[in-house]
Image (cartoon, helix red, strand yellow):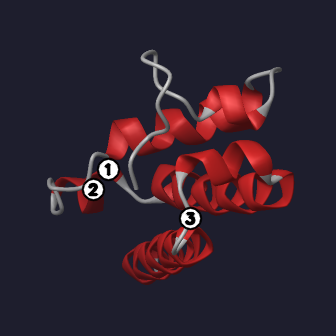
Amino acid sequence: MTALNDDIRLRHMLDAAKQALTFMEGKSNVSLDADAMLLLAVVKAIEIVGEAAAKITKERQATIPQIPWPQIIRMRNRLTHTPSSPSSASRSKSGTYWRM
């Protein structure tokens, strides 16, 4: 059952990541600052990716080392638990948005 759950969560990660990319198609980072609905939609998709990643077993994560598991999970935690706006939570220290 755990392997099946991991497969389902990997599918959730892929679907949400594709959705975030679709939301951003033809748009720039400036669009995120100007469009609160777009920003919230992209942030929610990233949260879904991170939530699913956090629930995938460590054993399964180890079989896919090209995925930056800790960074994905930290981003989800940062977006979910940072008391500031999603815009500032999704920016790196340099002020640029994280790449998808």
Q: Earlier in the sequence, mark 3 or mark 1?
A: 3
Looking at the rendered image, the quarter that the C terminus falls into is: bottom left
Inter-mark Cα distance, 3 to 2? 32 Å
Is 19 placed above or below 94 here?
below
Three-letter residue code for mark 3? Lys
Q: Is residue 78 left or right of residue 68?
A: right
**What whole-number distance in Å separates the C-alpha atoms at marks 3 and 1?**
35 Å
Foreground: 12 or 7?
Answer: 12
Is 98 displayed left or right of 90 in the figure?
left
Tell me the amino acid under the disc marked 2. Gln
Q: Residues within 10 Å of mark 3 (few under 14, many from 20)?
A: few
For the point 52% across and 81% down, the residue is 15
From the viewer's perspective, is the residue at label 3 or at label 1 nearer? 3
Residue drawn at x 49%, y 38% is 97
Circle number at residue 27: 3
Label 2 secondary element = helix
Identity, as a three-letter code, of the amino acid under mark 1: Lys
Question: In the rendered structure, are the residues bearing label 2 and label 1 in contact, judged by CB atoms less than 8 Å apart?
Answer: yes
Give me the disc on residue 58.
Answer: 1
Instruction: Write down the residue under mark 2.
Output: 61
